[in-house]
Structures are given as C-alpha cells and as structure tokens.
Amino acid sequence: MSRNHLEEAKRAWGLGYEGLSQEEIDQKVLAFTAIVRGIAMNGAVSATEFSRARGLDAGQASEIFTDLAIAGLEGADEKRIVGAALTVNPTPHRVRFESKQLYAWCALDTLFIPGFVGSMATVESRCPTSDASIRLTVTPERVETVDPIGTVISVVLPGAGGTGLTIGPASPT
C-alpha cells in the first residue's frame, strides 16, 4: 500500500472527529471503551451503568449514550447497548474471555478488544476464502499465538478505493 493510500485512509477515518477538540475526542474514545468493557463484563450496558462507569451525571451520560446508539451501536432496546465492536449477537468472530463467549463485529476488532477490556482473549474465526479455522490468543499488549502460522488480516480502508464504509454487524470482515 502506498503512502498516499495510508494518508487518504487516515483522513477518511478522521472525518468522524472533524471539528472536535482533543478533549471531545478523548471523551468519545473513553465512552466507547467503557461500553466495550461493560459488554465484556455484563453482556450489555445501560445508560445508568454507563454514567456510573464514566463518573458522569445522568444527563451527560444519557446524551453521550444516545449519540453512541445513533452512531450504529447495537441496542437490545433504546435503553441498553449490546454491541460496540464486541457483541452478544453471534458473528463469525468468536471472542472468549475466560468462560464468557462473545463475538466481534469484524476480524480487526478482535485485535484491540482485549486491550480495551484489559484481559486475555481467545479468538476463533474462519477464513472467508478457504473456510479454514483461525485461532488467536490476544492479550491487552499483543497477539500471543496464531494458528495457522502465516495468517493475515485484510482491512478495507475507507477512502482508499473501497466500495463504502460499513461498521457494526454489517462489516464485511
């Protein structure tokens, strides 16, 4: 991939943060992280749990929670989020934390979720081309094991000639 394609992808990903201060960007990242952690621990996150986890008053939490739900996170209903990169709904990408079985929206998500959660995960997926089983052990710091050796991941970069950006359960990876 050329340097121009990487810069184009970086700009496209950055559009979601356009016009925001660094503090606002940090708040979005912390909010998303709190939701992923809540899903890992409890299978879902309510606005009340979210406000507690973030140390926010109910009004602030509700506003952020609503914005995140509108942005495409999976909700069991309008008051709970059950999917944000990590989900309780089955996908091809299984993520296990100790004895808890969850799923990831896409293969790439399986690589950063353990860092957000702060716990090792075992990942099992299937190659979309060969249908071969792929297994990983991912810690918060790194990928520890990969089977089969030589496994690679492909990522469709927004703005780099792809057919469009999809997030959430509709993601093609």
Image (spheres, rainbow, N blue to C red):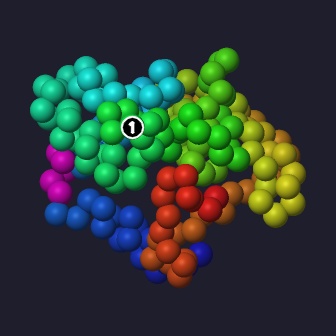
Q: Where does the image place residue 76, in percent across and percent down from the top left?
A: 44, 36
Q: Give me the residue at 63% from left, 21% from top.
A: 100
Return the residue nearer the eye: 158 or 89: 89
From the image, give the main secondary structure of the stretch colored magenta: helix
Helix, strand or loop for disc 1 = strand
**Quarter of the image containing the N terminus?**
bottom right
One can see residue 13 in this view: yes
Q: Give me the residue at 60% from left, 51% from top.
A: 106
Return the residue nearer the eye: 164 or 147: 164
Stretch in magenta:
20-24
Q: Where does the image place residue 14, in percent across and percent down from the top left?
A: 33, 64
Indicate whether 10 appears above or below 25: below
Q: Residue furthest front?
A: 77
Specify the amino acid type for callout 1: Asp
Return the residue nearer the eye: 113 or 1: 113
In this rendering, position of residue 10 left or right of residue 101: left
Q: Where does the image place residue 131, in percent across and percent down from the top left?
A: 85, 55
Quadrant of residue 130 within the rendered picture? bottom right
